[in-house]
Image (spheres, helix red, strand yellow):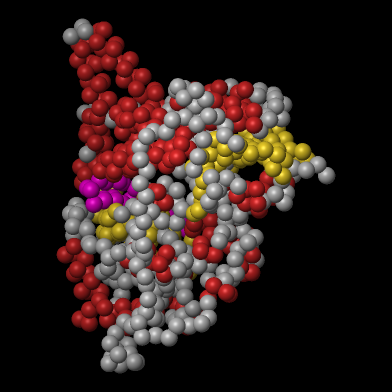
Amino acid sequence: MDETDPMNPSGLENGHSRSGNRVLYRMNSNQSNTSIFENVEMAHDELYSGPIAESLPTSVSAFSHRRPRADSTASFTYYHDDLEESQNELTYGNDGYEDAISDDIGDLAFGVDDDDSADIESGRQSGHFALRRRSSTQSRSSVHDRLLRTESTRTTESQYTHGRQSQKVYMVNEDLTIVVAGFRTSPIGLAVYILLSVSSLGLAWLLLRWLPRWHVKLLGRPSALSECDWVVIENQWGELSIMKVEKKLYGRPMSTIFGSSEKIPLLDEEHDPIVTELRMLNYRYVRLYFNQQTDCFILFSGWKDPNWADIKSVRLGLDSDEKHVREVVFGNNDIDIEQKSIPRLFVDEVFHPFYVFQIASLILWSLDEYYYYAIAIFLMSFGSITSTLIETRAYSCCLYPQGRETLAQAEVAMLQTYIEKADLKDGMSILDLGCGWGSGALYFAEVLPNSKITAFSNSKTQKEYIDGKAQAKGLKNLTVITGNVVDYEFQPESFDRVVSIELFEHMKNYELLMAKVARALKPGGRLFVHIFAHRTTPYDYEEGWMTTHFFTGGTMPSADLLLYFQRDLQIREQWWVNGVHYSKTCEDWLAKMVDSKQDIWPHLVATYGEQDAHVWYNRWQIFYLACSELFAYEGGDTWGVAHYLFEKPVA
């Protein structure tokens, strides 16, 4: 049933285009009658398990989107192609690069899957080899070549020369080419930097903050990547980032970081050396590890435990020692998006060139005794900075009962709807499962002061933000806990209500999730679910622009999908919120973003870089426009928001 009467759609036409995939076939071969799909064991007991198409990608779904990519023509300050070419010549000797790969290194496997392109996944240019044997279905040489290798001495020739100071990496997910250059701090340069900053009353510090290349030239001393203390990362747009190299004591074989192959035990120990110190970089939430054999940083992705060959092996789990080792390498299994503290944000805002100009104008107006103008400039600048710092962080569909509400009013209207539909009462114990930035949990704690509100998030950054907001509002009845919903177990029968806002779209195994919620609910307790949904048909986000940039691994459920999972909880009531409400929400967000462009621009630059800030600003505009048009399609009756109220039976 509809939540409210549908509002008028935006009027924009929706066009549909279909492009068929190219048929892939093999000539001059006998087709096998055996299907590999018959022997695939599905992870039905895992929270993220899904249909067979997700577990076993076909050649069309896995490879058809890959295209050869031309090398970047960008010019980098800290990297020179001629140097790389000379290194390759020294590395592989007179027989060349291709022979070195096919005859020597091709049998080793460190960190690149058999079905992945080496230069894409490993993050190296085509001039670097990937330690992985290529698929045996493709010939690497002519049929007239010798079957056995006769020149075994090439092993010692095909080693990277150590001591390189820079490297080039292509990040496929960002479609970005970067250069990583190693540096150490020069004692003389540091002394000059301090002297200039003090003698100029901070002016030199400010200029070097705005001109990072000067900062690097003054303080940096080029160093080998294997020994550097910090690096300069330059992308193809000429933007610079200065990052400290993270170091951790490790003392385990290299294969525990980059993977291994079945041939490793047959080889010399030098092929799997002990890594005494783990060196890593985190750039744009992508981790790179230093590989001492290739003498460069490698993009980290796709590591697989060689012992986990089937579902039964996976279910055996890990012992505590191995768990600790993997936490050292991979980190904790949570989404912890780094967020700047309020003081740091304030400093970044104040020392942005725009606001420095405002401060200079304020001083000049004051010296000319134009105090009213100076006060006006101060108030406008202070108000702009403050509004940026206290920006509301909420991302969910709002409700427009009359169609004339402001964005803030529509958000409150939807929050109030949650209270009514979930039947939340003051004095209850309530869990906000997947609380995001806490707009729902904070609202519940404020309007239900005698209730005990527990907000669950997988992000420590979100916890810090919500805790700060709760403290500012004087809320004592809100507790934020962090963890991974896959393995976190709540106290049995401890909640009267569980509210989940836009969490289920990111999960796959609803039956296990519903069972977990049922264990946390008291007998007679209820679960309220808010999810985006298609009226009739569920589908996964597997490829495309939206999948790549915004909703990787997500699922668009159908309105009736959750009704198939009532083993532990039974449905009491279901609602359909017309998609026009979310369409209007997106339009209001878009208008707010455009109106606040000057305020949000420093944050876009800080997050994406100067050049990519324009790209991402446009991407967000396209995102809002696309979602608005999609959810307004056919008057909001095709895509919308589904609300459910489930109840735990009383034994």
The part of the image, by quadrant, that contains residue 30 is: bottom left
| Residue 18 place in picture, x, y as percent | 36, 56
Q: Nearer the viewer, residue 65 or 460?
A: 65
The part of the image, by quadrant, that contains residue 87 is: bottom left
Give the vertical position of 72 relative to 206 (above or below). Answer: below
Left of 18 or right of it: where is 327?
Answer: right
Going 25% across and 27% down the picture, which residue do you hit? 354
Going 64% across and 65% down the picture, which residue do you hit? 315
| Residue 513 place in picture, x, y as percent | 64, 50
Left of 221 or right of it: where is 15?
Answer: right
| Residue 396 place in picture, x, y as percent | 50, 35
Q: Main secondary structure of the magenta part?
A: strand
| Residue 492 place in picture, x, y as percent | 74, 44
Q: Residue furthest right?
A: 651
Q: Is residue 53 in view?
A: yes
Task: Verify whether residue 247 appears in magenta.
Answer: yes
Give the vertical position of 483 relative to 379 (above or below). Answer: below
Give the vertical position of 365 relative to 604 (above or below). Answer: above
Q: Is residue 125 in view?
A: no
Q: Which residues are magenta?
A: 227-249
